[in-house]
Amino acid sequence: MNSQDIHQIRAFDRFYTQTLHLTDKYHLQTTLTLVEARLLLEIGENGRNTAIQLVQELRLDKGYLSRLITRLETNGLLQRTPDKRDKRAKVLSLTAAGRDQLALINRRADDQIRRLFVDLTPAETHRVIAAMQVIEGHVAVDPQLKTPNQQ
């Protein structure tokens, strides 16, 4: 891959990040950061309910994840309960307020995508989705790969 290819890929990454407002202080006009919102999604919808699972899936620092979990718990969005199989571990689950917050985030995220694609025909939308699937297929993250700060 040459430097021009790398430049174009990085430019698209910046475009995508800006278009979806991923660097905003709070995600989708909530009081949560993007990472906090993602934690709610992983816990509430994807069945990842232990800190170890979240560290592995999101590749977060354990200390950082611990602080995020504490903040979400303090704000009443999630709770920790002892794991019945392993008394040392805690199972994470969303509270009613956490489920409400996740539902709000999902509605706003869906609305954001609808607004972005409103002027596309169904055929154009399907071409964009097909291109996304090609990208996902070619650059799927290998969990065994280490990021630069993990080497």
Image (spheres, helix red, strand yellow):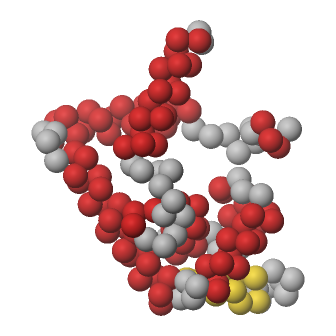
* Outermost residue to the front: 25
Residue shown at 46% from the left, 43% from the top:
17
Examine the rendered structure and indicate whether residue 53 appears above or below residue 73. Answer: above
Examine the rendered structure and indicate whether residue 69 appears above or below residue 8. Answer: below
Q: Based on the displayed image, in which of its 4 quarters is residue 122 positioned?
A: top left
Residue shown at 46% from the left, 62% from the top:
27
Q: Is residue 143 visible?
A: yes
- Relative to the observer, which residue lies in front, 65 or 19? 19
Residue shown at 44% from the left, 78% from the top:
101
Examine the rendered structure and indicate whether residue 2 appears above or below residue 114. Answer: above
Question: Is 100 positioned to the left or the right of 118 in the image?
Answer: right
- Relative to the observer, which residue lies in front, 126 or 17? 17
- Relative to the observer, which residue lies in front, 119 or 52? 119
The image quadrant where one finds the N terminus is top right
The image quadrant where one finds the C terminus is top right
Question: Is 116 positioned to the left or the right of 73 in the image?
Answer: left
Total marks drawn?
0
Residue shown at 16% from the left, 47% from the top:
118
- Relative to the observer, which residue lies in front, 4 or 30? 30
Q: Based on the displayed image, in which of its 4 quarters is residue 78 positioned?
A: bottom right
Q: Position of residue 75 (x, y in %)?
A: 58, 85
Q: Position of residue 90 (x, y in %)?
A: 76, 82
Q: Is residue 42 visible?
A: no
Q: Position of residue 13 (x, y in %)?
A: 49, 34
